[in-house]
Image: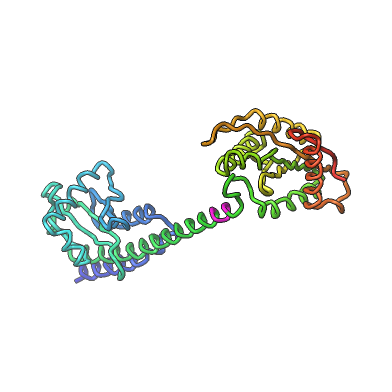
């Protein structure tokens, strides 16, 4: 009588301990962490030689091996499941949704195989395969009852984790899509450089930052010379290729982490050069002018060579802050560009902002 009482108290203690399985998992967690905790609890109940976790693939809806312990038994675990599927036992176990003690088909016949379906009210998540050296007759009804409790607790934690992971991936996908949409809204669809809308958003921030930290800032307005003639002679598709090549030529020579280019309109582009004094900006514009003039652009209508004119201006910390606005900077650069075109094009005209 005393032995029965001790056994009953031990059973109750195990049931209470297994009911606290979720408390041993720090959420959010991973399937691997849940599996490791589950294995520890299993080994406290019965002796296990091999164990494997199969999860239902959300795309194929098939049971796929996730983990095998030890790892070198993965092939035999797969073989065991395949044989159990072929003889119909596997589907019986899944439909029954209860742990089952079954004969081994791929492993040694002297071993005991226990299958533990991972199920919740909503769905089947997977199945756990256990290989034990304990003879079937020594695996008790109480053992299976405890395994049932543990498996249900594990299933609930695993379902929450899988749901959390799906939601997280959807959130990340949505964030990625929003970033791409935002990026596309900033870019000129033809040339890939920034568009006029983003120029109007970003340039005021650059001016504010330069004034606050007393740093130089320069801008260069550039325009493709006689671009209308290119369109009239070669067609608009060739003209589009020229615009793309123009942007490529400029971005090849500027600092990608600091400088940036925006399409101001038509064949006009504004190059913004933070941390750059007027003299250096003028030198860069001259290098760009020569680089553009050397390029030969291959189009479907033939080879095209172009030139470009540049108007450059900028300020340093000595300029009074009250007179500097993004619009004023652009207008000043445009005035110098007009002078460059008036003096014969294919040249750089620069001057201070005042």
107 in relation to 97, above or below: above
In the rendering, at what x and y percent does residue 320 appear? 88, 49
Tell me, yes or no, whether the highlighted magenta stretch contains residue 199: no
**Compared to 252, does 35 lie above or below?**
below
Task: Determine whether 21 is above or below 253 in the image.
Answer: below
Front-most of 36 and 31? 31
What colour scheme was applied to this rendering of the protein?
Answer: rainbow
Residues in magenta, as a range = 180-184
Is residue 83 or residue 68 the one in the foreground?
83
312 left or right of 291 in image: right
Q: Main secondary structure of the magenta part?
A: helix
* Residue 310 x, y percent position in the rendering: 75, 38
Task: Please state if 287 lies on the left or on the right of 181 as rendered.
Answer: right
Task: Quadrant for residue 158, please give it.
Answer: bottom left
Question: Which quadrant of the figure contains the C terminus?
Answer: top right
- Rendered view: 147 above or below 326: below
- Residue at 83% from the left image edge and 51% from the top image edge: 324
Residue 349, by quadrant, is top right
* Camera sees residue 274: no
Q: For the point 21% across and 63% down, which residue is it?
A: 94
């Amino acid at each position: 009588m005393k032995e029965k009482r001790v056994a009953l108290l031990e059973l109750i203690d195990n049931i209470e301990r297994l009911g606290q399985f979720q408390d041993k998992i720090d959420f959010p967690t991973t399937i691997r962490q849940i599996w490791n905790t589950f294995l520890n609890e299993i080994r406290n109940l019965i002796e296990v030689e091999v164990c494997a976790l199969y999860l239902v693939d959300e795309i194929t809806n098939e049971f796929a091996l996730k983990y095998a312990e030890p790892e070198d038994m993965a092939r035999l675990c797969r073989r065991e499941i395949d044989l159990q599927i072929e003889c119909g036992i596997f589907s019986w176990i899944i439909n029954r949704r209860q742990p089952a003690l079954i004969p081994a088909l791929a492993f040694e016949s002297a071993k005991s195989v226990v299958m533990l379906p991972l199920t919740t009210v909503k769905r089947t998540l997977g199945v756990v395969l256990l290989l034990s050296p304990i003879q079937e007759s020594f695996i008790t009804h109480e053992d299976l009852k405890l395994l049932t409790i543990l498996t249900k607790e594990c299933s609930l934690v695993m379902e929450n984790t899988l749901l959390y992971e799906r939601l997280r991936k959807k959130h990340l996908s949505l964030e990625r899509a929003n970033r791409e949409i935002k990026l596309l809204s900033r870019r000129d669809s033809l040339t890939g450089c920034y568009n006029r809308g983003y120029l109007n958003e970003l340039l005021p921030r650059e001016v504010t930052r330069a004034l606050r930290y007393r740093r130089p800032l320069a801008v260069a307005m550039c325009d493709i010379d006689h671009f209308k003639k290119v369109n009239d002679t070669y067609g608009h598709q060739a003209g589009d290729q020229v615009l793309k090549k123009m942007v490529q030529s400029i971005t090849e020579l500027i600092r990608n982490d600091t400088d940036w280019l925006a399409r101001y309109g038509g064949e006009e582009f504004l190059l913004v050069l933070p941390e750059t004094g007027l003299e250096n900006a003028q030198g860069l514009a001259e290098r760009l002018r020569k680089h553009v003039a050397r390029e030969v652009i291959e189009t479907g209508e033939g080879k095209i060579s172009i030139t470009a004119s540049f108007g450059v201006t900028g300020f340093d910390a000595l300029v009074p802050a009250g007179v500097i606005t993004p619009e004023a900077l652009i207008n000043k650069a445009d005035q110098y560009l007009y002078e460059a075109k008036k003096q014969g094009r294919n040249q750089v005209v620069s001057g201070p902002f005042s």
